[in-house]
Amino acid sequence: MVEFSIKSGAPQTGRSGCLVVGVFEPRKPSAAAVSLDRVAKGYLSGILRHGDMQGKSGTTLLLHNVPGVAAERVLLVGLGREAGFREKQYRDAVAAAIRALNATGAEEASLHLTELAVGRRDVAWKVAHAVMVARECAYRFTRMKSKNDEEPALRRLALNVDRAAQRRAAAGLEHGLAVAHGMNLAKDLGNLPPNVCTPAHLADQARELAKRYRMKLTVLEREDMEKLGMGTLLSVARGSSQPPKFITLEHRGGPQKMKPVVLVGKGITFDTGGISLKPAAEMDEMKFDMCGAASVLGTLKAVGEMRLPVNVVGVIPATENMPGGRASRPGDIVKSLSGQTVEILNTDAEGRLILCDALTYVERFKPAVVVDVATLTGACVIALGHVATGLFANDDALAREVLNAGETACDRVWHLPLWDDYQEQLKSNFADFANIGGRPAGAVTAACFLARFTKQYRWAHLDIAGTAWKSGKEKGATGRPVPLLTQFLLNRVKRGQR
Ligand code: BES
Ligand code: MN
Ligand code: ZN
């Protein structure tokens, strides 16, 4: 595991195993590269002139024994054109550097990319994102393998900044590490197999966080939910032999009177579709259907680590969606905690059924705002692919706040409509409404369903079906939207928002 530190000073004085400096396209050395070149008496500019490093983004060139330089190695990293060097290019450059470093035997390195100008981003942002990207590159899920792969040699990474910016850089380091740790927790929980990561396992993880960060934990059992009248949630749990859990984890870092931000995460630990059974192909990926829950736990970990002075309540309805003998049938009508009745026309639209009871339950916290996070619809993947998370909100100022946090965190969302015109699609002849709205605008009608339970407070809904995990060769949880949610809370702290 890499240890990070903040350093200042000219690159040539660093005695680290490897100095990492950038080169813009075409063959234009960054400031750090220029000062290295000066002590190396033109050695680097010679290399650029010969065309071995054009500065194209994603490329790297490793040099040994550069004359006049104390460090054993110098790694040149292509940055692309200077005019187009923005957040994404910066993060890509750091990732390319880390990957190249991991392929060398260097145990320590000194990263000068953190000195580059990245739009208007300050030094804290640059350091935080370098840390997050580095940790992202280092992530492996090896827990279920009987033999572990070899670890890369890199042990220490110094992040170079202006001497006057050291304090702000240290704050960025703390932020970056906290988010990285939160993302790693979210990834681990997502990647765990569904026979291990059950509702009870999620409750155990919440208990660990509660102990470590002195948070308050409440876990409701099936009987508690029955007494409360969580009929839609329980209708999903009926088909499974795993007991459902309703988890509440409270970080009280702000003044007692400060209204909390409530985060609600979908915790379906495996989604077979229930009686409306899913096809077999890729069904294993439905172990990721608890990634909303995992991101709520990950965010609470980051918040706990940073001791953020806000009140945050994480709420996780957790159950499997299985087709057991007691499972709900298409056509069943169930009563939600809100008193509204729902006709279950498709048992595979189960996420909204567990979320709606959670969204009613959270009224008791008198929330400042509520944000729910859910791998809710395949339709959202069709609409936005794997780039942006779908955002819906019953309050435009809140939507802007979330959008803005996503930009800063490089964990982006796109605002989709929640107009009443779509509510018609949920009409039922037999109950107050149905749990599906047909094929058109599936992500919107799912959000419209939830909107019927969130009238009492300002609310945003994040559909992370396309962004919570990757398929194919790189199959695995992404840890999103932990960066977005943490940034959202951090921005509220900075603004002193109630
Ligand atoms: N967990 C799924 C959504 C999902 C599907 C996420 C594929 C990522 C990839 C959800 O519970 C579900 O099954 N939704 C249905 C809703 C439909 C029956 C209205 C869907 O999207 O097909
Ligand atoms: Mn489903
Ligand atoms: Zn689901």
Image (spheres, rainbow, N blue to C red):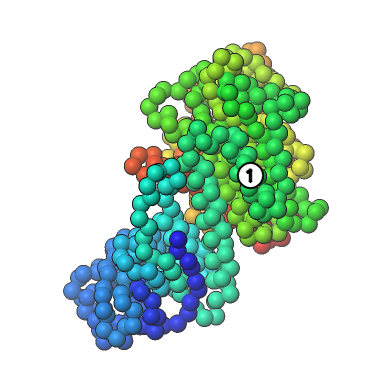
Q: Is residue 40 found left or right of 477 in the rendered image?
A: left
Question: At 51% across and 36% down in the image, what residue appears?
Answer: 196
Question: At 57% across and 64% down in the image, what residue appears?
Answer: 174
Q: Is the C terminus in the top left, top right, bottom left or bottom right quadrant?
A: bottom right
Q: Is the N terminus in the top left, top right, bottom left or bottom right quadrant?
A: bottom left
Q: Position of residue 293 (x, y in %)?
A: 58, 40
Label 1 sits on residue = 206
Q: In the displayed image of the protein, which residue is found farthest to the right? A: 257
Q: Position of residue 13 (x, y in %)?
A: 39, 84
Near mark 1 (Cα within 10 A), the count class, few <14, some 14-19 or many ≥20, is many
Q: In this view, does 226 lie above or below 12?
A: above
Question: At 32% across and 83% down in the image, what residue appears?
Answer: 69
Q: Where is residue 442 in the image (x, y as percent from the top left)?
A: 51, 29
Disc 1 is placed on an element classified as helix
The answer to whether the residue bearing label 1 lies less than 8 angstroms from the nearest atom of ligand 3 is no
Question: At 77% across and 53% down in the image, what residue appears?
Answer: 258
Quadrant of residue 28 within the rendered picture: bottom left
The answer to whether residue 262 is seen in the rendering is: no
Camera-side residue: 403 or 358? Answer: 358
Q: In this view, does 151 lie above or below 52?
A: above
Camera-side residue: 249 or 405? Answer: 249
Q: In the displayed image of the protein, which residue is found farthest to the front? A: 146
Camera-side residue: 34 or 179? Answer: 179
Camera-side residue: 78 or 432? Answer: 78
The disc labelled 1 sits on which kind of residue? Ala
Q: Where is residue 480 in the image (x, y as percent from the top left)?
A: 51, 47
Tally of marks: 1
The answer to whether residue 478 is seen in the rendering is: yes
